[in-house]
Amino acid sequence: MNLNKMLKQAQQLQQQAHRLQEDLASRRFEVEGAGGKLRAVASGGGQLLDLWISPELVAEGDAQMLSELILASVREALDLARQTSESEMQKLGAGLGLPGAP
């Protein structure tokens, strides 16, 4: 493979990676917890976008339990976003023999 072809492929990969990162950042990853009484939504960029807590769950009055449920749901949403992002980026580099590519 000549150097010009490799450079062109690298530029194309860079453009594809940039588009993929933009796409992932705009995606929403939603997770429900506590039997549907809690919902956390994260972006592909790793930001918490929304958190909904059922008034019924709040009325139960156990602040420690509520805190643990919130943390678990937020972590799960952020993990889902991170795992999806990693998977999509690995797919992008799979054909080029990049480290970490399947």
Image (cartoon, grey):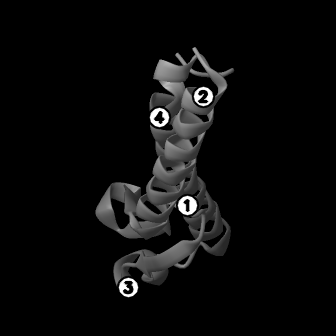
Query: What is the x, y in percent for residue 78?
Result: 56, 56
Whether the residues at callouts 1 and 3 have beta carbons within 8 Å, the answer is no
Position of residue 84 measured from the top left corner of the image (x, y, whole percent): 46, 43
Amino acid type indicated by mark 4: Leu
Residue type, mark 3 in image:
Pro
Question: Label 4 belongs to which residue?
Answer: 92
Judge by depth and name the residue closer to the eye, 78 or 102: 102
The amino acid beneath tag 2 is Met
Q: Nearer the viewer, mark 2 or mark 1?
A: 2
Helix, strand or loop at mark 1: helix
Question: Which tag, 4 or 1, sits closer to the chain's start?
Answer: 1
How many numbered circles are shown?
A: 4
- Mark 4 in CB contact with mark 2 (< 8 angstroms): no
Query: What residue did someone put label 2 on?
Result: 6
Asked if residue 73 is positioned above or below residue 79 in the image, the reply reads: below
Q: Are marks 2 and 3 in contact (CB under 8 Å)?
A: no
Q: Which residue is mark 3?
A: 55
Residue at 46% from the left image edge and 49% from the top image edge: 16
Mark 2 to mark 1: distance in Å?
Answer: 49 Å
Q: Is residue 72 left or right of residue 38?
A: right
Distance in Å between CA atoms under marks 4 and 2: 16 Å
Of the 4 image quadrants, the one containing the N terminus is top right
Image height of 63 relative to 69, above or below? below
Type of amino acid at the residue the image marks with label 1? Leu
Residue pointed to by mark 1? 69
| Crowd around label 3: few <14 · some 14–19 · many ≥20 (10 Å) | few
- Please tell me how crowded label 1 is: few (under 14), some (14-19), or many (20+) other residues with Cα within 10 Å: some
> Residues under labels 2 and 3: Cα distance?
58 Å
Above or below: residue 97 compared with residue 61:
above
For residue 24, what is the image quadrant?
Answer: bottom left
